[in-house]
Amino acid sequence: MNIQSSPGYRWCIFAICAGMYIMSHFWRVSTAVIAGDLSRDLSLSPDMLGLLGGAFFYSFGLAQLPMGPLLDRFGSRAVISSLACVGAASAIFFAFSTGGSMAILARAGIGVGMAAVLMGSYKIFTTWFSPREFATLAGFLISIGNLGAIGATAPLVWLSKAIGWRGAFLCLAMITLLIAVILFLVLRDHPPRQASMPPQNATPGNDIFFGLRTVFGSGLFWRIAPLGFASYGALITAQGLWGGPYLMHTYGLSKEAAGGILLAVPIGAICGSPLWGSWSDILKRRKLPVLWGQGAMLLVFSSLTMDLHLPGWGLLLQFWLLGFTFSSNFIIYAQVKETFPLAIVGTALTAVNFFIMMGAASFQHVMGVIMNNWTPSITGVYPLASYQWGFGVSAALLCLAVLVYTSSRDTGVDMQGGR
């Protein structure tokens, strides 16, 4: 019997896609706990360090615009695996970087390499799983992906202490390459009975541009996208690049202790994602859970601008709540999916993903520029005020985005679309 016809094969597909998505999440925030090492070894100023952290997201976000047509034309298997090889090669390049420009270019390459993983996985799920299973799979994929963010905290600190950050990046580049090869060899875009059929979602070139015009010309889109931009941007400033230095500089924590605190963010997201999603499905509404979750995130994130002198358990709770409340943000994917016609849903989803990644890129860079206005101590420690201003600007933009989102149109559960 053909292994692709066996009932368990589709779960093999899910497992391999989840493995690659774990690596995607790891690479997103892999600079957080080694920011000090990177600054020292590559002679980076704060604004250069911010650009280094944002380079992944700039390239990742820009790659979203052609991603839908590429996936439709060549299929998830070819696009994910080939780009992941580019990402692995870029990670190796990063490990051998000797200066800021070389490292920024390499990190941008990693971003391109991971750009197809989430949307490519969603696309392949539509052919191997029923519509009723899709929403559950999407939620589980997001939760599992946060294991990569967990790996980029304390575990990365331990590995870096053992073999250095360059050695750690080389090892993880090899793992990424291995998963890419397995994905290419094992996955198929369609079940055997559909293999000879043309892709049902293939879109002529003219229709692609029609979809982009429709999405970007919609006022409804512009009430949702800013929240994705600001919410993920704010999260990544605290989790991805500046959280480690903030904890070490303002609380005097060691690198290992800071990594342990940052570990609470993805754990909070793993706990929150299924709960927010379930609440949304029970209510058969999208807007209310997002407003509650993102409003709560604004309060938690704003606490980073205060001189609270929290104890260790308080810091753990603060960062856990940050991840938990942020995870309500993924519901906007369902809201976008239910706002636009089925024919252009793929374009709409990649468009909102573009803004989410641009937020992560620009917020990190802007915070670096803000912090560059302060002079560090002789030991390289930046004052609390520099972090308060940096996080404060992010909080203000998140507040503005939440206010804009209040004017968005609510949507309900579309059973035919799996929502």
Image (cartoon, rainbow, N blue to C red):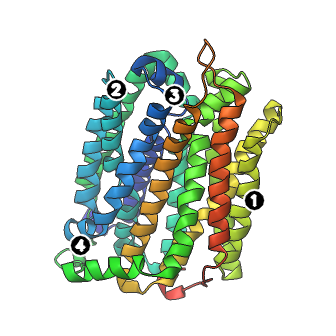
The residue labelled by disc 3 is 35
Picture coordinates of residue 32, whole percent (x, y): 54, 34
**Viewport quadrant of the C terminus:** bottom right
Residue 358, by quadrant, is bottom left
Classify 10 Å Cα crowding around label 2: few (below 14), some (14-19), many (20 and above).
many
Q: Nearer the viewer, mark 2 or mark 4?
A: 2
Secondary structure category for the residue under label 1: helix
Amino acid beneath label 2: Ala
Q: Which of marks 2 and 1 is in front?
A: 1
The structure residue drawn at horizontal position 51% and vertical position 28%, both measured from the top left corner, is 35
Q: Are marks 4 and 1 in contact (CB under 8 Å)?
A: no
Q: Give the CA separation, mark 4 to mark 1.
A: 47 Å
* Residue 46 visible to the viewer: yes
Return the disc, 4 or 1, that comes first in the chain's sequence: 4
The structure residue drawn at horizontal position 70% and vertical position 39%, both measured from the top left corner, is 388
Q: Which of marks 2 and 3 is in front?
A: 3
Q: Would you place residue 36 above or below residue 296 in this image? A: above
The residue labelled by disc 4 is 192
Amino acid beneath label 3: Ala
